[in-house]
Amino acid sequence: MNHFAASASALRVARTDDRVDVNPREVLADRVEQLYAQLPLGIAGTVLVGVIAATELSGGRYAEIVAGWGAFVFFVSAARLALYLKYRRSANRATEAEQWLRWLGIGALANGALWGFAAAVFFPSQADEHQVFLALLLTGAMSGGIPMYAASWPMYATYAGGIAAPFTYVLANFGNPLFSEIALLVPAFYAVSVAIAWRLNQVFSSGYRLRHAYQRLAAENAELNRRLQRQLAELDDARAQVEASGRKLALFAQRSPIAVLELDPHGRIREINPAAELLFGYAPADLVGAEMKALVVPEHRTEFDVQWRQLFETREPMSRQRLHNLRRDGIGIVCEWTVTPLVNPAGDTVAVIAQGRDITQELEAEQMKKEFTSTLSHELRTPLTSILGALQLVNSGVMGHPGKDIQELTTVAERNAQRLLDLINDILDIEKIESGKLTLVREPLALDEVLREALVLNRAFGDRYGVRFALRGDPPRVEVNADRKRLLQVMTNLLSNAAKFSPEGGTVEVSADCVGGRVRIGVHDRGPGVPESFRSRMFSRFAQAESALTRQKGGTGLGLAICKRLVEMMDGSIGFAEREGGGSTFYFDLPALRPPAVLS
């Protein structure tokens, strides 16, 4: 079992090594480190064996050669020791591993050469017992080099080749048939030794790669653990925030003055708040599990089904949806609902939140206000028209020439009567627009003709304030699809406003420019401008800037609101901009029927 477990572990390690990208330079640095770690032992072995060999071979007439060889052994060993010490002191061992490997290879070649020299010089001249000693010594030197240089088989091949080549040559040329046969075995022994060294080199390289792979994996695992810890901490914070938000939302729903209902995707009620209980008159136990459709007046349930399908098709919130709901006591009410689908990451709607309020009384009050305004305006308009007509007759001199004091009084009365009539007309217009009773008669209109007509019609109004109306350049010959009467009404409102607030003797300019498929009409004055605080509500009903000049000039505060609604009904838009050099520019855009080039 242990063998099989070890085999499985080795297989997993090998696969891990294949998956992890290991830097070859790091593996080379480890191999060089291993070789230099073995170097002191090799040096000591070389010196020890050299001393023994020199002692054994020092007798006779070869004593000087043996002494020289011993000095060579000492010199090579000292050089290799110096190389080892320099390597250990180096701070760039990892980055300069190739250079250190080359120096070590030179030392290995020199070490092998000194044993090869001993084989070439001493073996032929020695007695039989010394020859056996030398053969055993050389064989041991070759075998001992395998563990010394196993981390680099080319280095071992170089070292052992320095021993085997001279020894083989001596044996082959000795003249002894037995030695000649042994000469054939030495290369074979050399080849086997190199193969063993190559195999050990592969094992070492695999071990180094696996070590770096494990180090890399350990570092990545540590980083993943740190990230996981951070993510867990973030998730814990997020969970706490979600729980806090959930408590806030629950508290908000419970104390909200509007009805809040949670529905499932099938339209069944899951939960309601106290305001919903008061709105419909049901206890939570009576509504939870029931269909929302049951709270809709039967005549309007088809409309509810259409809106429900639309909600699930778009998955977008729907606001200001009016429904005719039914209370428990059978009374029908009109509620305004904001419906929000809750969609999960998969795109499925898991719940629907509906927020509603009873607007029945608001609608009734609004209807009463509209009826009152309409009735009052009509009732005032008839006698006021008669009064204005009579005053105009008096002031025109048809009834004779009254005195100067009477003329001043009737002129003031006519002016104020006209203001009242304008106010009533504006109120009637805005009421018709908002109730949807105002209809437009749209037709293709030449814009340049309409602008010139508007200037002619409002010239008298400009003269009253000492202001001149003028076109800026030639307007483009472009047609718009608009109601002529209402378009002139918009121009009249904008021109009258510009005239009121322009300095006496000034000029109000009217421009028209084509931009893309739309045409922009601008009215430019040199008045005091529009206060910053008033700009956001200048197009609202009864909106007037708070200034002495505004109170002096008067106005209903409905003109711009009417302009905005009329322009929008003609598929346009209206806006305001500050004029360079002082003053204001009110403009509106309308879609052009055809490009100007076609009409030119």
Image (spheres, helix red, strand yellow):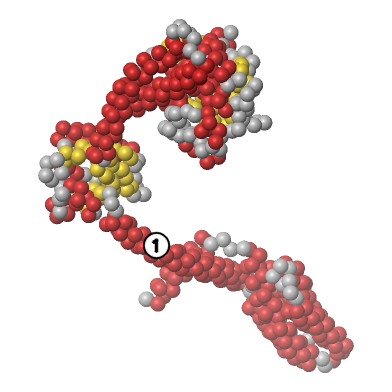
- Which secondary structure, mark 1? helix
In the picture, the quarter occupied by the N terminus is bottom left
State the residue in front, 142 or 338.
338
Q: Label 1: few (<14), some or many (≥20) within 10 Å?
A: few
Q: Position of residue 161 (x, y in %)?
A: 72, 71
Q: Where does the image place residue 337, in percent across and percent down from the top left?
A: 28, 42
In the visual, does 62 lie left or right of 589? right
Q: Amino acid at mark 1?
A: Gln
* Residue 291: x %, y % from top left: 17, 45
How many numbered tags mark residues here?
Answer: 1
Above or below 258: residue 165: below
**Residue pictured at 75% horizontal, 76% vertical:** 90
Quarter-wise, where is residue 251 in the image? bottom left
Q: Is residue 459 visible?
A: yes
> Which of the 4 image quadrants contains residue 508?
top right
Vertical order, 13 against 420 (above or below) = below
- Does residue 307 appear anywhere in the picture? no
User: Residue 421, located in which quarter of the rendered image?
Assistant: top left
Does 116 appear above or below 384?
below
| Residue name at image x 44 percent, y 10 percent | 393
Front residue (pair 599, 376): 376
Q: Residue 463, percent across and down?
A: 58, 17
Vertical comparison of 153 with 454: above or below: below
Q: Residue at x 55, y 40 (%)?
A: 532
Q: Front-most of 441 and 95?
A: 441
Query: Given the current orientation, which residue lies at the most extreme left position?
Result: 329
* Quadrant where the C terminus is found in the figure: top right
Q: Residue at x 40, y 77 (%)?
A: 2
Judging by the rendered image, the residue that carries numbered circle 1 is 241
**Nearer to the camera, 462 or 446:** 462
State left or right for residue 105 relative to residue 280.
Answer: right
Asked whether, in this view, residue 427 is left or right of residue 116, the answer is left
